[in-house]
Amino acid sequence: MRRVYLDNNATTPVLPEIFEAMRPYFGEQFGNASSIHHHGQETRAAVERARESVAGLLGCRASEIVFTSGGTEADNLAIFGLVAAGDHVITSTIEHHAVLNSCKQLQSLGCDVTYVPVDGQGRVDPDDVRRAVTSKTKLITIMMANNETGVLQPVDDIGRIAAEADVYFHTDAVQAAGKVHINVRTIGCDLLAISGHKIHAPQGVGALYVRKGTRLRAQLYGGSHERSRRAGTENVPGIVALGKAAELARRGLEQGTDIALSAMRDRLQKTLFDQIDATGVTAAGAPRVPNTTNIYFEHIEGEALVIALDLKGLAVSTGAACSSGAIEPSHVLTAMGLTADRARASIRFSLGKQNTNDDIEFALSLIPATVARLRELSPVYNRTVVSN
């Protein structure tokens, strides 16, 4: 059976050139990067080359990059490394659970948290952020791109608000890195998180940009790794892979791979909209990362469509991978004002560098008929058709 994968916001396949870059560090180049002998210095050099590469992708100094186990750890380090009991934090209602659950934990520790809303396009109003700032505000944490809709937030405006108020600004850029150009100086953020497995590196590695001069409390205790900001022997193969992924992502953006992804994404959503009634694109009018579209198909359950398509060889999702199987509808979509039924009828399609126009053709050959079949089984849809 042919299989096509359109769930790249959940995770991406490791590209062959990235796998080849990391391969030696599983075998012949195995040293501990903290050792002073040849084997250790060989791997230390590889870690520092990767650090330079990630810094190049984000527009910062190499010394401002802290390697982590992924985006969740990077977000947690940023938040818990700055905030203490009695502080005030501003975030949004559509953040990834790595941020939302961290903020809930902060509340249990005696912090105040303000959750600013989003509009019907899934965007935060910077004025809401400005109005939420108090004398106790320590941190603003607003994501750069949403994992379910792909909507880009006005992080440059929020960065200016944070600077004017003299508070820290952290942005979760896990779903933005490699898809749009990022420059931390332009954004004006103090901290920014990325994850390797969203840009074709393996799972289990990520990075946090920490602006020079930011006093960040370590959350892991041990050695003085990562300039005493993150203890633990470095995951050299993963770090090398992240460095190579950052290099390829930067080159791809320079060569216009984002334009090619956007063209495939737009063709997919336009064709589905034209061929299937009672269908719409969520946040179609908002700026989005080029690889993502969230489409609702009225009168069906999204998870039923995911399963039916998977049986035919097409992998898509109803939203965040870490929330799959949840009974409640997506907190992102309901925060945008979608009804529970429409939120449950929504499917996320997310493309990666490995996808081709043939993959889009394959998806389009399956989805309309599968939606029609599921609607035939839907008493709600049949009653609607008869009444009309």
Image (tube, rainbow, N blue to C red):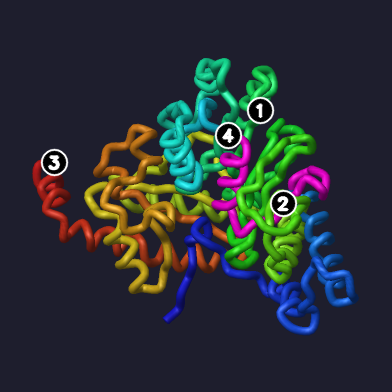
Q: Amino acid at mark 2?
A: Val
- Numbered label attached to residue 74: none
- Numbered label attached to residue 159: 1
Question: Is 19 displayed left or right of 281 in the figure?
Answer: right
Per the image, label 3 sits on a secondary structure element best described as loop
- Numbered label attached to residue 83: 4
Q: Are marks 2 and 1 in contact (CB under 8 Å)?
A: no
Question: Is 260 displayed left or right of 277 in the figure?
Answer: right
Per the image, label 4 sits on a secondary structure element best described as loop
The span from disc 3 to disc 2 (Cα, nearest Å) is 59 Å
Nearest to the eye among marks 3 and 4: give it.
4
The span from disc 4 to disc 2 (Cα, nearest Å) is 18 Å
Reading the chain from its start, which is encountered first: label 1 or label 3?
1
The answer, for residue 355, to whether it is visible in the render is: no
Nearest to the eye among marks 3 and 2: give it.
2
Which contiguous range is marked in magenta? Answer: 58-83
Q: Does the magenta segment cover residue 59?
A: yes
Q: Quadrant of residue 303?
A: bottom left
| Most foreground residue, 319 or 83 | 83
Nearest to the eye among marks 4 and 2: give it.
4
Give the residue at mark 3: 388
Q: Position of residue 99 (x, y in %)?
A: 50, 42
Q: Is residue 125 above or below residue 376?
A: above
Nearest to the eye among marks 4 and 1: give it.
4
The span from disc 2 to disc 1 (Cα, nearest Å) is 21 Å
Reading the chain from its start, which is encountered first: label 2 or label 1?
2
Q: Amino acid at mark 1?
A: Gly
Q: Quadrant of residue 288?
A: top right
Residue at image position (54%, 16%) is 134
Give the residue at mark 2: 66
